[in-house]
Image (cartoon, grey):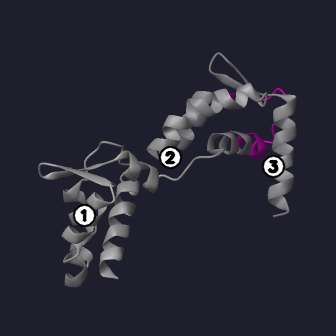
Amino acid sequence: MSKAFVKKEILDFLAKDKTEQGQALNLNALFHTHIIFWNPGQQAYVEPAITELIKENILRPQGEKYFLTKTGFNLIYPPLNDFVKDTVLSWFEKNHAKEGHTLDVHALYLKHTMNWTPKQNSAFETGLKKMASEGLIEIKNGSVTLTKHGFEARNKSVCVSSHS
């Protein structure tokens, strides 16, 4: 039970630390923010938990450091699905946007990205392009404009979420 706890805590730490694929686990920060508060039994499981994470291809050892693998990255940051689409349509909905309403992409990006995971940040531009290809928005000169189709999709998502 304690090794499972330690593994979960390490994975949660990696996610909260916004660790990127190929980036080293910050053992110093993990120690000072987590391990020192654990009981001796939990502390004894740190090394076995890291060994297990290596066997599961979540971490890759190199010298004295442990690096997050692609498998680990995909584990700690779940699939995005329609994350960008939901974020943009939600912004339009919260601002009571109608067809033709324009949003400054940079303002949206800056407002949200501080709390986003690396996976979410890297999907932003691709997600906007996908929305444009679906006819939900138009992108021009750093702005996003809600189309008629986007307005209808925004209304559908509001109706679905208000009846869920």
Q: Which mark is residue 1?
A: none
Q: Position of residue 1 (x, y in %)?
A: 35, 82
Which quadrant of the figure has residue 13? Answer: bottom left
Question: Does 48 appear above or below 123?
Answer: below
Label drawn at residue 116: 2
Q: Which residue is mark 1?
A: 50
Residue 43: x and y in percent read 21, 76
Q: CA distance from mark 3 to mark 2?
A: 22 Å
Binning the other alpha carbons within 10 Å of mark 1 as few (below 14), some (14 to 19) or many (20 upward) gives many
In the image, taking residue 28 as reference, residue 103 lies left or right, namely: right
Mark 3 residue crowding within 10 angstroms, few (<14) / some (14–19) / many (20+): some
Asked if the magenta segment contains residue 97, the reply would be: yes
Residue occupying image coordinates x 50% and y 46%: 116
C-alpha span from label 2 to label 1: 26 Å
The CA distance from mark 1 to mark 3 is: 42 Å
Magenta range: 91-103
Query: Is the residue under label 1 in contact with that under label 2 (CB below 8 Å)?
Result: no
From the viewer's perspective, is the residue at label 2 or at label 1 nearer? 1
Secondary structure found at label 2? loop
Tag 3 residue? 157
Q: Nearer the viewer, residue 93 or 133?
A: 133
Measured as percent of width and height from the top left, residue 99 is found at 85, 30
The local secondary structure at tag 3 comes to helix
